[in-house]
Amino acid sequence: MIHLNQLKLLDIHLKALDWQQFEGSALLFCNIARFCGFSPQLHELEKIALKNNSLKIILSPCNQFLQEPGSNQTLCHHYNSENIIFTEKLNVNGKNTHPVYQALKQASDRKLLKNFIFWNFTKFTVSADRKTVKRYDPWISPLLISEIRDHE
């Protein structure tokens, strides 16, 4: 089980997310970067968000793979959606790993190398009851993830 409500996560405007707004909803977390070859998945995620009210999508810009330059302020101009939540720019690996991503990695179903994210667009689904966290590698399209299709 993952206890997200004990962790602080800021949105792209640096306001703390209220985890209570997600009660009863499945979640999808993903580290993103505009200049990544997997960035077309942003359109797929937007499509999913439009069709699926019971799934909340939380995307986190990350420059640890050198494909997301700029500050939170400049990223606000690039990431804007009424259907997706964008977080502050954060780290997903190393000593400055954001606590949410640390918790996602630890709670995930991954067995080998679970504490390291290899690239942008690594996706984590969290069940509505917060008991199940599944991890998907970047090359897996969000349109192919069964937990997402099951909520449509």
Image (tube, helix red, strand yellow):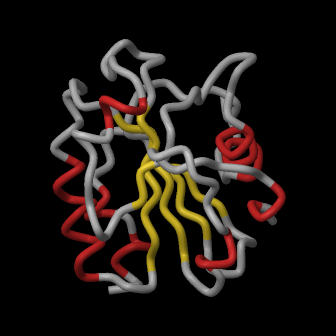
When asked about the image quadrant of residue 97, the answer is top right
Q: Percent from the top left, x then y, of residue 147? A: 45, 73
Residue drawn at point x = 27 percent, y = 46 percent? 79
* Residue 44 in the image: above or below residue 92: below
Viewer-side residue, 107 vs 3:
3
Viewer-side residue, 17 vs 52:
17
Viewer-side residue, 116 vs 69:
69
**Count of marks placed on residues:** 0
Q: Percent from the top left, x then y, of residue 39? A: 21, 38
Residue drawn at point x = 58 percent, y = 58 percent? 134
**Residue placed furthest toward the top:** 66
When asked about the image quadrant of residue 33, the answer is top left
Q: Is residue 26 left or right of residue 150?
A: right
Viewer-side residue, 91 vs 8:
8
Residue drawn at point x = 39 percent, y = 73 percent? 148
When asked about the image quadrant of residue 38, the answer is top left
Q: Percent from the top left, x then y, of residue 19? A: 67, 69
Q: Percent from the top left, x then y, of residue 59? A: 43, 49
